[in-house]
């Protein structure tokens, strides 16, 4: 009985830890900053996002929209690297991230390959809404990883286009897609 | 006999000057409790002022740090949305180009 209880508590702890750890960015990716000409490293977890929300002005309609968008997010991780030379990283460096984007939670929404560029967009289906968005974009001399964990409203993000340097977008919440399939592909 | 008594009585009741500094000592003794009370009050006031100033300083520093962190978090949120938007725009254009071909 005691062993069963210990096992049950351990299982609960492991599952709680696993759910708390949203995304693990491999050390190999983090070390790319040393080789990069320019890099951006952003990690915002729940409390920091809440704090950011407090500093977004509700009186300003654009900032209010960002505030509402951010209020439903659990975390944001952004890594971008620009290199002087090609071949500073390989596609396989991204495999540990792709491995975390597995069905049934995650589905690849878009995949586009064009002249040495490869972009993938993954979405997390959380009931009938988007529970997360991951963008992996590789270029010959650049790499971008954007992980938005939490309910993200693409319509609202679209509406922010033209403000805060966000380009005008024509996005809408996608239909649920089967995991591992590309909805659109432009090769 | 009566004269003797009278003389002794007069001697006993003669006017005698107070010793030097007697008046000052009396006045000092009379004023001491009030001065001590004033000192205690002054010390309490200094302690309270210092405590309030220290607490106020700590609160201000914490609030200033929170403000700096909040502004930085806001900047990072906007930069993240900017990068996400740019990448989505790029992929939107690629997909549209793919459809046109």
Image (cartoon, coloured by chain):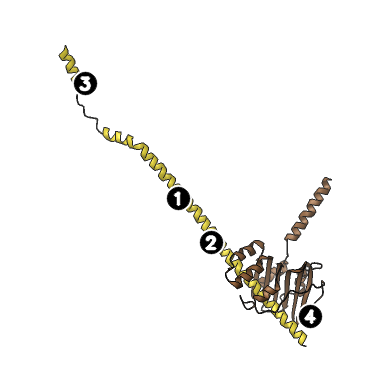
Alpha-carbon distance for marks 3 and 2?
80 Å
Is residue A141 shown to the viewer in this render? no
Label 2 crowd bin: few (<14), some (14–19), many (20+), radius 10 Å: few
Considering every residue shown, the one lying at the far top of the view is B1
Asked if marks 1 and 2 touch (Cβ < 8 Å), the reply is: no
- Chain A: what color? brown
Q: Are marks 4 and 2 on the same chain?
A: no
> Which residue is label 1 attached to?
B49
Q: Residues within 10 Å of mark 4 (few under 14, many from 20)?
A: some
A179 sits to left or right of A63: right
Q: Which mark is residue B12?
A: 3
Q: Are marks 4 and 1 in contact (CB under 8 Å)?
A: no
Q: Nearer the viewer, residue A171 or B7?
A: A171
Q: Tell me whether circle 1 and circle 3 mark residues in contact (CB < 8 Å).
A: no
Residue hosting label 2:
B64
Task: Say which chain tag 1 marks.
Answer: B
* Secondary structure found at label 1: helix
Horizontal arrangement in the rendering, residue B16 relative to residue A50 (left or right): left
- Foreground pick, A27 / B100: B100
Residue B61 seen in this snapshot: yes
Chain in yellow colour: B
* Secondary structure beneath label 2: helix
| Residue A178, x across and y down, in percent | 82, 72
**Distance of mark 1 from mark 2, alpha carbons?**
22 Å
Residue at 41% x, 43% y is B41
Q: Residue furthest bottom?
A: B101
The image quarter containing residue B72 is bottom right
Name the residue carrying label 4: A185
């Amino acid at each position: 009985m005691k062993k069963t209880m210990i096992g049950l508590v351990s299982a609960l702890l492991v599952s709680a830890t696993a759910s708390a750890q949203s995304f693990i960015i491999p050390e190999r990716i983090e070390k790319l900053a040393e080789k990069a000409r320019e890099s951006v490293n952003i990690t915002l977890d729940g409390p920091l996002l809440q704090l950011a929300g407090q500093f977004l002005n509700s009186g300003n309609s654009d900032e209010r929209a960002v505030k509402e968008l951010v209020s439903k997010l659990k975390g944001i991780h952004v890594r971008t690297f620009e290199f002087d030379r090609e071949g500073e990283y390989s596609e396989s460096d991204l495999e540990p991230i792709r491995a975390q984007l597995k069905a049934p939670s995650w589905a690849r929404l878009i995949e586009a390959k064009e002249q040495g560029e490869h972009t993938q967009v993954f979405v997390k289906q959380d009931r009938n809404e988007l529970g997360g968005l991951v963008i992996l974009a590789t270029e010959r001399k650049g790499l971008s990883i954007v992980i938005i964990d939490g309910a993200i409203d693409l319509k609202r993000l679209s509406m922010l286009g033209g403000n805060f340097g966000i380009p005008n977008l024509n996005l809408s919440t996608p239909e649920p897609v089967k995991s591992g399939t590309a909805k659109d592909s432009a090769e | 006999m009566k004269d003797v008594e009278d003389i002794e009585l007069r001697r006993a009741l003669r006017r005698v000057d107070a010793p030097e500094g007697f008046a000052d000592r009396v006045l000092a003794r009379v004023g001491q409790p009030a001065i001590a009370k004033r000192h205690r009050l002054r010390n309490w006031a200094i302690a309270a002022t210092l405590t309030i100033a220290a607490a106020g300083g700590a609160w201000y520093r914490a609030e200033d740090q929170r403000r700096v962190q909040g502004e930085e978090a806001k900047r990072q949120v906007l930069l993240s949305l900017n990068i996400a938007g740019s990448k989505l725009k790029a992929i939107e254009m690629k997909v549209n180009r793919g459809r046109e071909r």
